[in-house]
Image (cartoon, coloured by chain):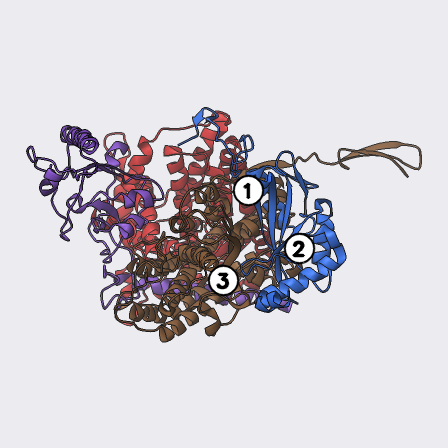
Amino acid sequence: MQELGKAESNSIRITRQDDQRVTIEKDLDTEHMVLSMGPQHPSTHGVLRLECITDGEVIVEAEPYLGYLHRCFEKHCEKIDYPAIVPYTDRMDYLAGMNSELAYCITVEKLLDIEIPRRVEFIRVITSELNRIASHLVAIGTYAIDLGAFTPFLFCFRDREHIMNLLEWISGARMLYNYIWIGGVAYDAPADFKKRVAEFVTYFRPKAVELYKLLTENEIFVKRTKGIGIMPADVAINFAWSGPMLRGSGVKWDLRRNDPYSVYPELDFDVPVPDGKFSDVGDCLSRHLVRALEMEESLKIIEQCLDKMPEQQGFDPRAVIPKKIRPKAGEVYGRAENPRGELGYYIVSDGKSTKPVRCKARSSCFVNLAAMKDLSKGQLLPDLVAIIGSIDIVLGEVDR
Amino acid sequence: MSEYFSNIKTSATTIATGMAITLKHFFNAVKRKGDAGIDDADYFRQVDGLCTLQYPREAVPTPPHGRYRLYCHIDDCIGCRQCERACPVECITIDTIKATNDDLAACGKTSGGQQKRMWVPVFDIDIAKCMTCGICVSVCPTECLYHTPVADFSEFDVKNMLYHFGNLSKIEAEAKRKKLAEQQVQAAKEKAAAGDAPAAKPAPKPKPAAPPQE
Amino acid sequence: MEEAANQMSPAVLESKAAYDIIRERFGDAVSEFDANPTMPFFEVLDVDRWVDIALYMRDNSLLQFNYMACLSGMDYPEEEKLGIVCNLECIGKYAHKIAVKVKCKRDGGSIPSVSCVWHTANWHEREAYDMYGMVFEGHPDLRRILCPEDWTGYPLRKDYQVQETYHGIKVPY
Amino acid sequence: MSSSPSLNTWSDALSGLSIGWFPLGLVIIAAIPLVFIALYALTYGVYGERKISAFMQDRLGPMEVGFWGLLQTLADILKLLQKEDIVPKMADKFLFVIGPGILFVGSFLAFAVLPFGPAFIGADLNVGLFYAVGIVALEVVGILAAGWGSNNKWALYGAVRSVAQIVSYEIPASIALLCAAMLAGTLSMQQITMMQAGPGGFMHWFLFTNPIAWLPFLIYFISSLAETNRAPFDIPEAESELVAGYFTEYSGMKFAVIFLAEYGSMFMVSAIISIAFLGGWTSPLPNIGGLELNAMTSGPVWGAFWIIMKGFFFIFVQMWLRWTLPRLRVDQLMYLCWKVLTPFSLIAFVLTAVWVINH
């Protein structure tokens, strides 16, 4: 038997049999289908568009297309003063505004080299950790909804509502706070704030357990996420993944520990990393698990901060804010641990202007999403949804 | 084979756990969280039960410095334009006319007792552009800009989102401008005539300040 | 020199040590070390060797810069150059980090792509190309990423003039 | 049946009622279940789903239209009626239009053989169960027509998934129902119900008379979820994956028809499972000594009441499941069908056969 030729990627085979008969075999004709997923699709978390080449339900290739929510953050930054950039950073990662502000402010403060009052540091950490919980709640909730479970989503939003109320109380806004300012915060915490946050912590603990039982332990959920979209640790580092994504791959890397800022060195908390018992290290379930466990760590941090926060009557949180923010010439790359990973700002100042020459935001989602193409290869369409959900993108941050 | 059965078992138990949780919530639906504001002492009193509110009738009260609609109390505005410069989205438009010395009394004082030196014929806030960041509020020296707890201010016409706060009508503004120009011309003449003598002008007639437009 | 070294913070000293290894290997291909406290960096002077340097930095057992935190495009109008700034660090063995600058001509300049060294550079370089217009040689898929494919001009260049209309839509707002 | 004579006179009287040549009584008898279904499906199925989901999720649910939002579904139907009926330009118009029709007809045809009481039955076929199982398969055609006709990739995905799912799950479902048929020794729905009636109330139901019956009962319940595309098997309309599955392109009244068909078939499978295993319209209350609870709660009206209650109970369980569980993946769905439910249903079949022989 001798093969004479093939055509159209092996679907037609021409062979010569031993008795000199020539046979032409033809497979069932199949074609790849191009499926445009998004920008309006329920599970692309905003306006991400994935151009999927599919073979039936199997994704041959999924190419992300971004930019539908591009709002020229970096261009804007070159036109406005340093303090006026803060509300724009809110609008990047709108689910974790406090963390974005914190990252930006500590970057500029590095450039300015100013000392922040201790109480302000604690207020910043409390608010940003509250915001981290809120952000993880949305991540978990929307992940549940991606996988078809509606109820955990609403439970998450119910609890997030309390955080939103707390943050509105302290900052005046529910999502886009403009609360953490360069050199301070906008307002001092209200008198009862500590008490209410402590109440929230006691309220939230059992709810988190309930959520864990309802969603994370559910066998269908585990089956949908375990072993899907596995990212080995070295590849994850090469893709510069950060935050829960990198920790999901088993790398114990948390900027709050590894590149400490604010008062984090004083606080006692764990960096949860999956151990491979409940999930396969690096899969969607690990990433989900890291988020679920991180909420508990955030609660711990908040409790410690409430204990340690110095009480000061008539405290002025704006005391050390410079009148005119004009950093000396130089450049800085500052970063903080966002709920979604490392949020970095590269800021260049020329020393003359009150506006940055360059302000690049290294957004965690943008970097994490870059691995989408490699992660989705050969997966089923429902798994693609699970993978996108586990990356936990906020398109505001991806497109900036 | 044992894995097969253990799988079925874990599925059954975890599904049963989940269903128990949802059923508990179903029976808790007789309770309601209520509309306690975050600054109420018993905010976390009712943690189970329904948590949504029927909005127009029930609403969560807004906290003290909640940032909702930007409002300018023009009587206190000294026309320093700091808010206009600070606004990142350029939603504030201000036009000022320097008050002539004889008009200072008519121009009035702020509630803090500061003498106002500017007429503010145009103080427009494009509330459709405003992103309620509150930077303008923080830079305002007389605290005449603040946020009111009005959350619902949608309009059918986007033009209605342009709020006018100026304290002079167009005609009045024109008169003031003319007057200022005349005086400046006169002052320049005097200056040319008498070196740097301070410009002291006679007062023609004071004009009442127009009521602030809402 | 001794005194200057004494004033450096431990983090900068670590970067300096890493830089010394690179300097030893590549000599004049890299510039002097800029030991500023906020972001210590060096510049790659021989742009063609940038990929070699990147590979060396990633794979040398004493350096192991396996994590590219950020790659930002930059415009240097007074030098008539465009450039990139890479913030590199090591996850795992060491805790050092360093920034690398690579510059190219402002018009038609090109920089070798390091997306084969760090996968994450792929999208960062696309973004830098999108915003500044420098070409990354050897990039597998150099397209615009945030702006529309048919956008004219490179928005973050300092001399950027926004186009009047885009598909009949007025652009300047 | 103690109540049979009075029942028969009642239904005989009703069927004898006629205005001139027009057999009004017969029409009424046939129409009562349908009117009920329409009312149920139109208003209270959807309303119930919304309220139940709301309460499970700590929400209020619809509250504005009518007292506690009772008229919400009517308002929705009115809204859908007023909507423009859009047929996509590139759609296969014939299939696109006929799809929801087939779906609707398919899901409501089975109601013909469902006994809603000793007298309320559209057609007491001697192959009632067989007919009910068979006619449900008609839905597949409707779904495929809708999905293919839409000329939309998501709809096509949904349709193909749905066909695979429904056809596969017919097997365990049918075998499970066969167990009930074996226990009853008949395929007539009415007779299956009769077999489970008695003074002992629920004691006579197949689920409780037979030590194995819980297995086919469970299997049929799970398969029925899959057949009606309910969560966790709502893969054909998997909202977060396929936008809306096979009815992505539908709007207005066509959408409403698909929606109603879904709720109709939900009730249908709930009624079938009640008939096959839980005694249909028979009262669950036993006669305890002198207290003749069973006799008191039996009768034509009571019969309708009981089967509707049983149906509602299963609908509640379906909703309860839906608002608790995530969705399975396509291959897991097939795994569940072919590797879990089908073998177990065969085992149940054999065991039931052994049990029947020994009794």
- Disc 1 residue type (three-letter): Val
- The residue to which callout 1 is attached is D163
Mark 3 to mark 1 CA distance (whole Å): 37 Å
**Considering the numbered disc 3 on the image, is that residue within a helix, a strand or a loop?**
helix
- Residue B169 vs A166, above or below: the answer is above
Disc 3 and disc 1 in contact, CB within 8 angstroms: no
Could you say which is closer to the camera, residue A254 or residue C11? C11
- Residue C128 vs C56, above or below: the answer is above
- The residue to which callout 2 is attached is C32
Mark 1 to mark 2 CA distance (whole Å): 69 Å
- Disc 2 residue type (three-letter): Glu
Which colour is chain C painted? blue
Q: Residues within 10 Å of mark 3 (few under 14, many from 20)?
A: many
State the purple chain.
B
Could you say which is closer to the camera, residue B52 or residue B178? B178
Residue D346 percent location from the top left of the image:
59, 58
- The residue to which callout 3 is attached is A291
Which residue is located at x 60 percent, y 65 percent? Answer: C4
Q: Chain of mark 1?
A: D
**Considering the numbered disc 2 on the image, is that residue within a helix, a strand or a loop?**
loop
Mark 2 to mark 3 CA distance (whole Å): 43 Å
Q: Quadrant of the C terminus of chain B?
A: top left
Q: Say whether residue A343 is left or right of residue A374.
A: left
Disc 2 and disc 3 in contact, CB within 8 angstroms: no
Could you say which is closer to the camera, residue A282 or residue C53? C53
Whether callout 2 and callout 3 share a subunit is answered: no
Res A180 quadrant in image: bottom left
Q: Chain of mark 3?
A: A
State the red chain.
D
Q: How many marks do you count on the picture? A: 3
